[in-house]
Image (cartoon, rainbow, N blue to C red):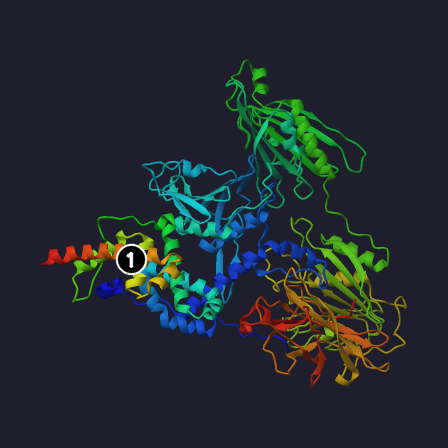
Amino acid sequence: MIGGDVSGTAGPPDFEQYVAARRTSLRRTAYLLCGDWDRAEDVVQDALARLYVHWRRASRAGSVDAYARRTVVNAFLAEGRRPWRRERSTDTVPDTAYADPTTTADSRDSLLHALAQLGPSQRAIVVLRYWDDLSIEETAEILGTSAGNVKSQAARGLAHLRQVLTIVEVDHE
Amino acid sequence: MSDLDEGRDLHAAFGTLLVDEPAAPWSVSDDVTRGRALQRRRRTRAGAGVGLAAAVVMVFGVFGPLRPHTAAVVPPAFSPPAVQGVDQAWLDSLSRSFTAVNATAVDWTTSTVTSTSDGGFALDLNLVGVTVTTGGEDFTVEYPPLPAPTVSRALVTWKPRGGTGPVLASCAAPECSRAEPSVSPGFSEEGGRWDSSGAQITGSFVVDHTFDAGGMLEIATSPVVKDGVVVAKDWATLDYGGIRIVLDRVGRPTGDGTPPNDQFGVTSLLMDLGWTVDGVTVQRVPLGQPAEISWAVHRTGSDANAATGRLTIRTWDERSWNPGEGAIDPASVIASCAKSGACSNVASSIVDCVSATGCWSTSAATTLTSVGAAPARSYILYAYNEGAQHAVEAVVEPLSPVVPCMDTGFCQRSGSFLDEQETAQVVEVVKKQLDASPSPSPSVTPTTPASDDAVTRTLEGFGMRVKSVFDNNRGANVVRVYDVDVDLTADNPVGAQLTITRFAAADVSLGTERVAVDGSAMNSCTSTTCTPLTNVTFPCPTSYCFQDWWAITTPAYTGYDQGTLIVFRADGTNAVEAVVGVKNCPTCGQTAGSGSAFLTLEQAQEVLTAFGLPRGGTVPGPSATPAVTRPCAPEDVKLIPGAGVPDEVTGGRGNWIEVHARNPEVDCIVSGVDSVSLVDASGASLAFRYRAGVYQLRDFGDGPVEVSQAVGPARFALSKYRCDEAPAVPAATAYVTLDGWTRPVGVELPAGSAGVEQCPGGLDAAGNTVYVSGVVRPG
C-alpha cells in the first residue's frame, strides 16, 4: 500500500564531511575573534547553519573554506553589533584557568587583552592573516574590503600586539 | 620580510590561547538540524505572503478545501483579534515567535491591541506557557485551557514615524541601565535593562528597533508580579537576546497603516463631534462573552478645555445573549446599577412590538461609585433587542481631569465627554450595525425529498445546522451528502459531512456478522481498516425487524478520515448507511487526522431512523441491473492521463489519471490505488516518497467507483510540491497498481510544467514526495 516514510535528519553528505573535518578549526578561529568559547560556539553554530542553507552554492564555488570563514567572520561581526553582546575595552581580563605549562598565564592574559583591544574588524584581519595564514587578498575578499586596507590594518594590529607582548616579556625579565 | 613572516611567532602565540579549549559539545547532526531549521524558516517567511492567496485559490480549486497545516492549528483564543489598520498575520507571527523562543504564547483574551492615530499600534500582551514538542522537522504546540496563569508580560509599540518607545523612554538610571546604541545595515537598536524596579519591574528588558526604512518597533518583556511577589517563570521573560530573536523573526510590521477605526463607524462619529481619537483598543473576547471596544479621545484647546475621555462599547449577539432579569445581561454595567446607591438617574424605556426582528428597549444611568469597569460619574446607556437577541452598552467615562462639581445635578453630566444625546447617537450607530450583521442562519430548507427534511430537523435537534444537501448518487444507489455546521456557538466554523446512502439492492440477512453490500463504506471495513465490527438486531415489537452494524475507521481506511463512524442498517431486503465524518475545525487546536465523528452512535442511529429504512415499496426495489461487484482487472481498463492541476501559488504540481473501461462489455469497480512507481524517459526509476492523499489538500477519494463506458471513468490524482531548484527530472511514465492487481499498468504522463518531476536534494526535498489520492468519479 502507499505510505511509509524514510524520515531522517541527514544533510548533504559533503556538508557533513566538511563539518566533521573543519568544525574544530572554525571554532578556534571564532574563539580568537570572540575570546570566549561559549560565544565561539554560538558563532560557529550560526555560521554553519547559514553555510548549510547555501551549501550548494558554496560547494559549487570551489572554495568552501573561504565561504565558511566568511560566514564565521560575518556571524562574529553581526554578534558584535548586538547591544547585549557589545564589547567594551576594559582594564581587566576575566579570570581563566590555564593548563599549558610552557606559557605563562600572564602572557596569555596579555595577548587576549591585546586582541580584545583591537576593533572587531581589525581583530578579524589579524586572526585571518596570522592564525589562518590567509593572504592579504584572501583576507580582503572574505571581509569585503580592499587589500590596502587589510595591509594597513594588519600592520597596525600586529604592531599593537607586539607592543603588548614585548612589554610582557620585559616585565618577565 | 613580509608582514606574514613577521607574524609567524604570533601564530604560535595564538596557539597558546587554545590550551583551555573545552570539549566540543556538538555533533554533525546538530549542525545539520540547525541548518535545516534555518532553511525551513526562510522558506516559511518567503511563502507567508502568498499563503492567504493560496487558500483563496485552492479552497475553490480542483481538490476541495485546504488541509490545515499543523503549524496553523491554533485555538481561537490564541488567534489575534481583527483590528483596523493592524495586520492580523503579523500579530499572529509575533505570538508564534514567542512560542518558538521561550515556549509562551499570547493569550489574546486577556491582551489588548490598540490602534493608534498615527497608524501605529500598542500591544499589552499577557503570555502563557505552552508545551512545545519537537520531533523530526516539525514541532507541535499544545495550548493550555484558558484561563491560564500569565508567566510573562510584553509591551509592544509600533511607531510608523519612528521615535523612542514608551518603555525605553522610561529607562533611566539608577534603576535602568541602557546599552549603547548600535547600528546595523537596515536598522539601529538601543536597549535597556531594569536592575531594580522603577518604571518597570526588576528583570525587565526592552529593545527599540528602528528601521532605516522608517518606523520603530519596541518590544519590552517583564516578569509578572502579584502582591509584590514575582510569580513569572524565569524562562518566560525574554532578555536582550530573546527579544532580538523575536524582532528578527517578525520583521517590520505590516498593515495598511490607516488611522484607527472600527467596524461600527463610531470613530468617525466621535471625530464629527469634535474629538480627536487617540486610539481604539480591541481585545479578543472569549466565546459567549460580549465584544468590547474602547476609544481614547482628547480635545485640545486652552488648558481649561483640554481633556481626555474614554468610551467603551460592549455588544452582545445571539451567541453571547444571556438575558437576566428585565432582559438585561448580568455582565453589563447597567445590571450593577440595581445595587442600591450604585447609580442615579436610572431610566428605562421598554418597547414591545410585533416585529419578527424585535424592537430596541433602553436603560440609562449615571454611576455614583465605581461600578465594574466604569468609574464613578460614568454615563451608561444600554439598549437591547429581545427579538434579535442583540444588546449594546455604551460607557462614557468622565473627562480627565475631572471637572469640579458645581452642584450634584450638573456634576453628574458635565463630567462625561459625551452628553446623553451624543451617546444615543453612538449607540444608534452600533445598533444599526448589529442589526445588519449576519446572524447564524437557519438550516437550508430542503425541497426534496422528505427524508432530507427529517434528517435536517434531527440534526437541528442536536444543535447543528445543515448548510447544504446535495446528491452524489452512484448507479442505482441514492446518496445524499449533508454539509453540517456542527457548533453554532463557535466563533470559528466547525464543519462536518454526513453521507447517507440508500442501497438499491441489499440482500443482507439479519443475524449475519458482516455486511457485504457493494459500494458500502462498511464493506471496506476489515480488521485493520476499522475497529471491530459490531452489530445488533433490534427486537421486533411488530412484524418489522432490522439490524445495525457499526464501526469506526482506522488510519488504514482509504477514503475516509480516521475516526469516521459508519452505521449500516438493513432489514433483510433494504439497507441504508450513514457515514459520519470527523469535525473539520482548522482553528480549534485539532491535529489533522485526530478528529472524531461529529455524531455519536446513538445520534447516527436516530438520523438513520429519521431518514427512513424503505418499507412497503416506498423505495426503489432491487435494480434491474445487478450491482457491480467485480473488481476491474488490468485488462479491463486503460489508464489515460487527465488534466494537469498545477498551482503556481502553492507550488503544487499534479496530474489526474483516469481509469477508463476498455470496451462496452466492461463493468467493474475500482476501489483504490495500491501503489505507484514513476520512471524517467529512459525508463530509470525515480526516487520518490509516496504518500496517500493530496498535496496540501484534504484527502479525497470515496472508495469503490464503478467503471464502464456507460457510467464513465474513475480517476485519481498524483500531486506534489514543485521543484525549487534545477535540474528537475520529469517523470515520463507512471506504473500504477490498483487495489487487487498483481501487476502494474503504465501510463505516459504529459510533459510540461504540470508534470510530476523529481527534484534535486534527494528524498528529503519537499518536492520529492508524491501524494496519491483515492479514486473518485470525475466531475
Q: Is residue B486 left or right of residue B610?
A: left
Q: Quadrant of the N terminus of chain B?
A: bottom left
Q: Residue furthest left?
A: A173
Q: Picture quarter containing residue B697?
A: bottom right
Q: Quadrant of the C terminus of chain B?
A: bottom right
Q: At 80% across and 35% down in the image, what residue appears?
A: B355
Q: Is residue B454 left or right of residue B34?
A: right
Residue B230 at x, y = what percent? Answer: 38, 44
Residue B361 at x, y = what percent? Answer: 72, 30
Label total for image:
1
Label 1 is placed on what type of residue?
Ala
Crowd around label 1: few <14 · some 14–19 · many ≥20 (10 Å): many
Secondary element at image label 1: helix
Q: Is residue B96 left or right of residue A88?
A: right
Q: Nearer the viewer, residue B309 or A130?
A: A130
Q: Is residue A100 left or right of residue B602?
A: left
Q: Nearer the viewer, residue B753 or A42?
A: B753
Q: Is residue B412 above or below residue B126?
A: above
Q: Nearer the viewer, residue B777 or B8?
A: B8
Residue B377 at x, y = what percent? Answer: 56, 23
Q: Please state the chain letter of the residue tagged with numbered disc 1 in the rendered image.
A: A
Q: Is residue B256 visible?
A: yes
Q: At 44% across and 65% down in the image, what residue appears?
A: A51
Q: Nearer the viewer, residue B557 or B34?
A: B34
Q: Dot 1 corresponds to which residue?
A: A154
Q: At 71% across and 78% down in the image, what residue appears?
A: B748
Residue B385 at x, y = what percent? Answer: 72, 35
Q: Is residue A146 above or below residue B500?
A: above
